Amino acid sequence: MTNFQLISDNLKEEKIEFEILWIGQSELFYKGIESTLIDKYWQFLLLNDGSLTKQLQLLKNKKIKRKLLEESPINFTTSFISYLTQPIKIPIIQRNIFLYSNEVEPLIYATSWWSENTINSFFLDKEQPIWSNLAQLKIEFYRDLRKILLINSKSLEKQFNKKGPFWSRYYLIWYNNFPITIIFEIFSPIIKV
């Protein structure tokens, strides 16, 4: 079972089921993706290693807000725990959120996994998105993009109030040569409007 399959299976347990239509591997991230598959706008958002929160604020000309859906210790399969604990120390906290520019339609659905021992070190204000917190800390970090995916999800079509497919990605964030979190993000098509 691949690492991404473990993440996918975990999200199904969270009632975010999806069908993978296309997967881009890391070798594409440096040379770009064919414009017949993905336009430059989406490439910029998905491949950019800057602050997604800041990019969304610029695109929407509004402050980006976070809605916490759930934050709890994980209780998953042995194989998923095994995958997460390679980069992230146990015990592990899972956070599920939406990012909004208004209170109506979410722009992003994201799930992240953090070590319980370090999560509070990186969240000065849990009401703010991750990138806002990291910026407040004035720390250098590295986003290690692992995969870009095109997916269909009936459950997210309802949440986003838009038909799929949806672009998504998953990556690790590194700080001082240590991974601090794994993040999986799914983008609403409304971002481009």
Image (cartoon, helix red, strand yellow):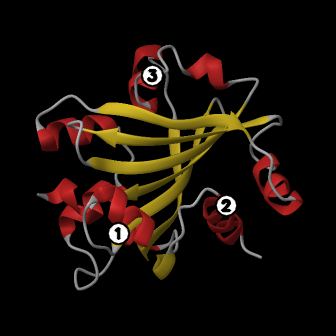
For the N terminus, give its image quadrant: bottom right
Which amino acid type corresponds to the residue marked 1 in the rendered image?
Phe
Circle on res. 133: 3
Which amino acid type corresponds to the residue marked 2 in the rendered image?
Glu
Mark 2 vs 3, N-terminal side? 2
x, y percent for residue 42: 25, 64
x, y percent for residue 92: 76, 37
Mark 3 vs 1, N-terminal side? 3
x, y percent for residue 48: 34, 52
How much space separates mark 2 and mark 3, taking CA atoms? 28 Å
Look at the picture and state if 78 lies above or below 56. Answer: below
Circle on res. 166: 1
Front residue (pair 175, 42) = 42
Query: Which residue sits furthest right?
Result: 78
Q: What secondary structure is marked by label 2?
A: helix
x, y percent for residue 171: 55, 53
Let me know if residue 153 appears in the view: no
Task: Say few, some or many: other residues with alpha carbon within 10 Å of mark 3 (under 14 / 14 to 19 / 20 or more).
Answer: some
Q: Tell which tag, 2 or 3, sits nearer the viewer.
A: 2
Mark 2 vs 1, N-terminal side? 2
- Say which residue label 2 marks: 13
Q: Are marks 2 and 3 in contact (CB under 8 Å)?
A: no
Q: Tell which tag, 3 or 1, sits nearer the viewer.
A: 1
Circle on res. 152: none
